[in-house]
Every structure is written in structure tokens, then in C-alpha cells.
Image (tube, coloured by chain):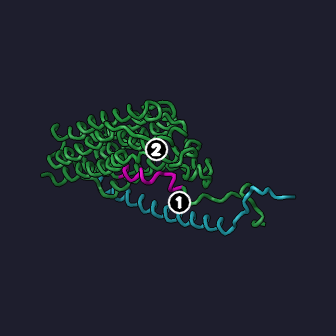
Chain colours: A cyan, B green
Amino acid sequence: MTEDPTQEPFDEAEYRRRQRSRANLMAWMLGGLAILFFLITIAKMQIFA
Amino acid sequence: MAQSLTHDETALPADWRDLFALTKPRVMSLVVFTALCGLLAAPGSVHPVLAFSSILAIALGAGASGALNQWYEAGIDAKMKRTAGRPLPAGRLDPQTALQFGVGLAAFSLFLMLFASNWQATLMLLASILFYVFVYTMWLKPRTPQNIVIGGAAGAFPPLIGWVAATGSIAPLPVLLFLLIFLWTPPHFWALALFVRSDYAAAGIPMMPVVAGEKSTRRQILFYAVIMAIGAVAPWPLGYTGALYGWTAVVLSAIFVLLSIQVGTRTTGEGDLMQPEKRLFAFSIAYLFILFGAVVVDHWWPL
């Protein structure tokens, strides 16, 4: 088998770096949203109390 | 082994910076600011958490619109120098990811708005996203030089949504603020279109300077600038704002019209640096920021 010269070789380190940075960002965003939704609920309870 | 894999076999996951760039952050900053001003200028008070969440929902909705716009226009963006470096035309992101990201973000923004605010603001946010994506991006932009005029409505929604998120109803002042952005859009974008005209021509987008010519575009910039100035000052004599906003609007609109006269009455030759057009474009951004800031200051600390 000969490799297609136009295809770039796969960079596993870059793959892992991007995967890790996206996973970290997703974790922070989900955590932030959980807190935000909690705060929205508390705020609404205060308003409608 | 992984080392022998190619992009065809295992594509790299999108970098979060490219996904962020897809949301057009610079446009989003103006959207967030005008929405915040609409919310703060509304009567009564909003709980800070709900206000923050509503503004976040508007920002995410604007980001979703930007992502879907870039997904649809990837082919056009590739032909323009100004946009060729964006994640999709540069090949750093695949279209499927961009589409999923845009649709997901739009759905989430609507859910957040409904949860934090009211259905009226949610419906308006939905309308603004649909208008920007389907009416402006897909229908108007590739077909008519009036694309910016009618499409300007999409960018004019944020202060209205901000106000409705705070009050649950529409009032004359946010409608006038909507009108202000609507009338501001043509001179702002046509000033830009004048100095990136060759870019739009290369991409086949019927922007006003490409279709109607430079002279006609310059006349129309001046025409819209005058109407916009009247629209900007109008809230003061109509009694919806005080003197602080009124005088700010009078002074800034006068400068806007003067810069537009400079642009509207001149002719350019080969190799012109387009300084007056660039000056008008830059001033138009500051104009909107200061004017909306004045609406809020006038509401909270009137003269």
C-alpha cells in the first residue's frame, strides 16, 4: 500500500491536546450552567414568594 | 497504529477557538451591549441573575446566528480576503460540526431565555435568529443590494428583546431604539462596502457599491445618515428620554452627518486610501455604543 502524498500525517499529540482542551472547557461550561440554573431557580423563588 | 492514521481516517476534533470564532465575537459585543442597554433602560428592576441570564441568552442566540451564517456562507467567505481566514473557508472546521454547533446553540439560547425570562422575549429571540439566518443570509444577501437595509432589522432586535425580557411587553422607546439601529445599518455597512468593494465583487454579493455604483452608494449613505440622525434625536422631543440623551444624540448625530457629507459628496480615483469611509465606519461603531450608553445613563441619572 502506498500512502496518498496529499494527506497530512495524523498528529496524535495535537489530537489529544484538542480533545483535552475541549473536555476541560465542556466541564467548566456544564459546571457554570448548573450553577446558573440553580441561581435562576432561587431568583424566581424569591420573586414569586 | 495511530501514527499511521490520516485525516480521512480520524479527523482532528475542532479547536474551541475556532468554534468561538464561528460566533462572530466582535458583532456579539455590540449585540450584548445594545441588549443590556434595552434591559437597563426598561422601567422597574430586574433580578440581577435573571438579567444576566437573559443577556447571556441573547448573546448565545447572536452567536448561533453568526455560526449558521458562516456555515451557509463558507463558499462565499473563501472568495473574500476579509473572510478567507475564518475557520470554515480555512479548512480548520468541518461544515457538519459548524451546523450542529449553530443549531445546538440556538436551541439552548431559546431554552435559557424561556427559563430565565418570559415567552415574549423567547419568541422575539427566535424571530431574530430565523430572520438573520433565513431572510437575511439565505434570501436577501445573495439577491438584492437592499440586503443590508432590510437585513438590518435582524441586528436591531437586541435592545427590543432586552426590554421585553425585563418587562414582558413592548413600549415606544425600545421601538425607537430598534429603528435607530435599523437606520444606522445602511450607512455603517455601505461605508465598509466602499472600501472592501472588490472583495464583495469577487464573491458575487450584490452589495450596493457593486450593483448601483459608488456614486449612488455615497448619496444613499448621506440620505440614510440624515434620516438616522432624526430617528436618533426623536426620543427626546417625544418625551421618552431626557436632555442628557437628547444633547448626546444631537452632537453625535451632527458629527455622523458631517462625516457622511464628506463621504457622500466626494469622488475617488485609482489608489484612493478611502480615509473618510474608514473614518465614518469607525465612528459609526462608537456612535452606537455611546448613544445606547446615554439612554441608560439618562434613565438612571437624568439631568
- Name the chain under label 2: B
**Residue drawn at x 44%, y 54% as measured from the top left:** B25
* Amino acid type for the residue under numbered disc 1: Arg
Along the viewing direction, whichever of B237 and B227 lies nearer the viewer: B227
Residue B258 at x, y percent in the picture = 25, 42
Q: Is residue A21 visible to us here?
A: yes
Along the viewing direction, whichever of B143 and B170 lies nearer the viewer: B143
Range covered by the magenta-colored residues = B19-32
Q: CA distance from mark 2 to mark 1?
A: 26 Å
Left or right: B63 as drawn, with respect to B219: right
Q: Which mark is residue B58?
A: none
Along the viewing direction, whichever of B262 and B201 lies nearer the viewer: B262
**In the figure, residue B146 lies in which quadrant?**
top left
**Residue drawn at x 43%, y 30% as measured from the top left:** B212
**Residue drawn at x 75%, y 55% as measured from the top left:** A6
- Name the chain under label 1: B
Give the quadrant of the N terminus of chain B: bottom right
Circle count: 2
Which residue, given by chain and number where applicable, does mark 1 sit on?
B17
Which residue, given by chain and number where applicable, does mark 2 sit on?
B196
Q: Is residue B124 visible to us here?
A: no
- The mark that comes first in sequence, 2 or 1, is 1
Q: Residue furthest front?
A: B270
Q: Residue furthest right?
A: A1
Residue B147 at x, y percent in the picture = 44, 34
Left or right: B149 as drawn, with respect to B225: right
Q: Residues within 10 Å of mark 2 (few under 14, many from 20)?
A: some
The verdict on residue B8 being magenta is: no
Q: Residues within 10 Å of mark 1 (few under 14, many from 20)?
A: few
Left or right: B4 as drawn, with respect to B23: right
* Amino acid type for the residue under numbered disc 2: Val
